[in-house]
């Protein structure tokens, strides 16, 4: 069980401000009149004391309170430019930010949960004792903002007033971080007091890049204090490490849902998007996939795009699953974003009228370029490691690509043509009918399959595997990625899994409102399915077919083939959908994609069982599902052999 406000609040311990009187004295001595007047709008004393402790500890030259007004937001843009954190590009509203070469992805080995003695944590979580984290903060954070401006913003992780929406404070000395916050989150300065009172909590995020030199990066730390819902980030600028409203606060939301909102809320690493079906019917999906595994592409395939990364869920009074995107913008990987696969996003990136912050791409004559954009590449320019020319190699002799694999674009989601902005901003949330889980699987699971029931659906989520991607510094190989949320689950996996089983089996759902749960896999390759070469069996535009079939199935328009792993689509239904995207779909390809490779699936189940047997208190339901599926698969193998054709199951 997570116990809130347990142990000493590190911010208060180091800052030394214990009450509102001391806080106001700090404000009077450190904040100018105009910014003090703005801060008077905030009456939540706990929030004010946290801000005062930050000022006391970090010792900035000045303090800027961001009210969210156009003037304040413009001040932040200009501050980032003055500080050299961003530079203007040729297109109006476009800027470029370069992180240090050592700081261009999540610093997973330097990211820790602050824990109290006796707390049970996920086996996948890195932890640091409270006393040790306190020593770090005392050593490195006093005076870290000397010569800089401390900026304070008040944000809402979702539409204000939504059931699963939580307010947060972002404090940083980086104009780039605060500029990004304005694109990615809803400024709730005017509503902060009411929102903090409504939900009974808020998250606090403190960041400073310090001198921002390569020598400092080894000292960088990202701490998440679960008990006090406070994050600390030092000596880095990459937004995944510094804009802690994002993954830092997502972790807190996961904790809060797991331990304090059981069968009421979930906090997931999922996109939200809608598909238009027959007669104009709208069906909404939420789906998980680890970073770099096609989540943004899947989200934007939808006719009614809501979000590409995070989702907060609850069950409403009518038993309908509802979701909100805690973000209002996109912090998306740009590698392989092109006209063919991402036309709406490309309209924003290459068209006029969209504010975009680029990071770690190649810039030539004020124009950004990136790997996989489908355009003619320049021969030279400036990129994530400095001056670049075609054929340049690193110290090990490896070619340096023109853009970092984790290079990003940050922009408002509402700028994208298929974004359902009105629904996205509705505090009543989006009604979700389909939940999907996917990873990066080259040889085992078919492109799409539906769980037979909610328990089997949770098991699909628990069984995601993926190759490590460039979003994590120092990560290699093939990783288990349960629910694609595993890197962001602080508590014991058993507790999180129990919450999942309880939520999706809730009696609040009816048979007609309970969502279907499915697996997706875009990464099967030819040589693993009886073909030649390592090319994929599908391509980006096929995603529309797999989601289209799920839309039809969820609404009872098509039937499916029952197999041990779940329900698979029939060929004729897929053929019609492929015709809709003007693509041939031979039956031979259907056979390659949907035949069951029994030994591979059984080996995958064994892998998961072995891993989860090392976790204490995992619900027995998971192992019952695995054993049932394995027994049925082995019966099929006895009947048909190790490869079972989909035709043999029809």
Image (tube, rainbow, N blue to C red):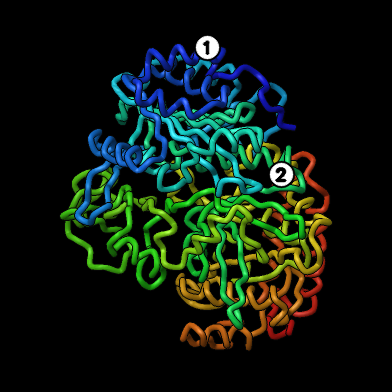
Which quarter of the rendered picture does the C terminus lie within? bottom right
Mark 1–mark 2 distance (CA, rounded to whole Å): 41 Å
Task: Residue 222: give x, y in percent of width and height.
Answer: 48, 31
Q: Badge 2 is on which residue? A: 496
Task: Residue 428: give x, y in percent of width and height.
Answer: 63, 55
Task: Residue 610: give x, y in percent of width and height.
Answer: 72, 49
Task: Residue 586: give x, y in percent of width and height.
Answer: 54, 88
> Would you say 527 lies left or right of 624 here?
left
Q: Quadrant of residue 414?
A: bottom left
For residue 480, say whether it is visible: no
Q: Residue at x 63, y 63 (%)?
A: 436
Q: Looking at the image, is 27 positioned above or below residue 470?
A: above
Q: Residue at x 27, y 48 (%)?
A: 95
Q: Quadrant of residue 533?
A: bottom left
Of the numbered discs 1 and 2, the one sitting upstream in the chain is 1
Q: Which mark is residue 21?
A: 1
Total of numbered circles in the picture?
A: 2
Q: Residue at x 75, y 32 (%)?
A: 1
């Amino acid at each position: 069980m997570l116990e809130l406000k347990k142990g000493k609040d590190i911010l208060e311990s180091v800052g030394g401000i214990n009450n509102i009187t001391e806080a106001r004295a700090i404000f009077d001595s450190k904040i100018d009149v105009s910014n003090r007047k703005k801060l008077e709008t905030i009456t939540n004393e706990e929030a004010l004391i946290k801000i005062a402790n930050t000022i006391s500890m970090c010792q900035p030259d000045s303090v800027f309170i961001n009210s969210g007004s156009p003037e304040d937001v413009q001040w932040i843009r200009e501050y980032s430019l003055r500080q050299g954190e961003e530079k203007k590009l040729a297109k109006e509203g476009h800027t470029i930010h370069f992180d240090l070469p050592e700081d261009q992805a999540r610093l997973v080995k330097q990211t820790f949960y602050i824990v109290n003695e006796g707390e049970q944590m996920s086996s996948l979580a890195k932890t640091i004792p409270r006393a040790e984290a306190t020593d770090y903060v005392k050593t490195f954070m006093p005076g870290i903002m000397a010569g800089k401006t401390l900026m304070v913003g008040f944000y809402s992780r979702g539409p204000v007033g939504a059931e699963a929406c939580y307010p947060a404070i972002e404090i940083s000395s980086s104009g780039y971080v605060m500029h990004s916050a304005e694109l990615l989150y809803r400024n709730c300065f005017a509503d902060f007091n009411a929102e903090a009172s409504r939900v009974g909590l808020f998250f606090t995020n403190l960041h400073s890049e310090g001198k921002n030199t390569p020598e400092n990066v080894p000292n960088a730390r990202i701490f998440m204090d679960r008990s006090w819902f406070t994050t600390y980030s030092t000596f880095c600028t990459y937004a995944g490490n510094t804009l802690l409203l994002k993954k830092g606060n997502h972790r807190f939301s996961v904790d809060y849902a797991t331990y304090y909102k059981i069968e009421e809320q979930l906090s997931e690493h999922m996109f939200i998007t809608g598909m238009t079906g027959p007669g104009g019917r709208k069906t909404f999906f939420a789906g998980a996939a680890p970073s770099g595994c096609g989540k943004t592409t899947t989200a934007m395939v939808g006719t009614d795009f809501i979000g590409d990364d995070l989702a907060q869920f609850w069950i409403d009074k009518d038993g309908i699953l509802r979701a909100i995107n805690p973000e209002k913008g996109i912090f998306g990987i740009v590698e392989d974003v092109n006209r063919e696969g991402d036309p709406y996003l490309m309209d924003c990136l290459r068209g006029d009228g969209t504010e975009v912050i680029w990071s770690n791409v190649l810039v030539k004559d004020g124009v950004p370029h990136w790997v996989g954009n489908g355009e003619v590449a320049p021969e030279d320019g400036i990129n994530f490691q400095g001056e670049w020319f075609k054929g340049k190699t690193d110290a090990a002799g490896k070619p340096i690509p023109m853009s970092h694999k984790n290079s990003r674009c940050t922009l408002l989601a509402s700028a994208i043509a298929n974004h359902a902005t009105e629904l996205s901003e509705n505090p009543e949330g989006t009604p979700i009918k389909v939940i999907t889980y996917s990873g990066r699987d080259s040889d085992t699971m078919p492109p799409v399959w539906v769980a037979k029931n909610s328990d089997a659906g949770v098991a699909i989520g628990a069984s995601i595997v993926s190759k490590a991607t460039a979003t994590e510094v120092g990560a290699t190989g093939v990783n288990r990625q349960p629910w694609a949320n595993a890197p962001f689950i602080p508590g014991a996996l058993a507790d999180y899994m129990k919450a999942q089983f309880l939520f999706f089996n809730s009696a609040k759902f009816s048979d007609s409102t309970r969502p279907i749960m499915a697996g997706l896999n875009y990464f099967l390759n030819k040589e693993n399915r009886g073909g030649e070469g390592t090319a994929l069996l599908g391509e980006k535009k096929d995603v529309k077919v797999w989601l289209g079939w799920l839309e039809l199935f969820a609404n009872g328009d098509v039937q499916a083939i029952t197999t041990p792993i779940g329900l698979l689509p029939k060929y004729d239904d897929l053929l019609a959908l492929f015709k809709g995207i003007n693509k041939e779909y031979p039956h031979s390809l259907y056979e390659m994609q949907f035949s069951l490779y029994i030994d591979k699936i059984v080996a995958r189940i064994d892998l998961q069982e072995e891993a989860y047997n090392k976790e204490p208190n995992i619900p027995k339901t998971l192992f019952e599902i695995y054993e049932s599926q394995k027994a049925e698969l082995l019966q099929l193998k006895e009947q048909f052999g190790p490869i079972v054709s989909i035709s043999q199951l029809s």
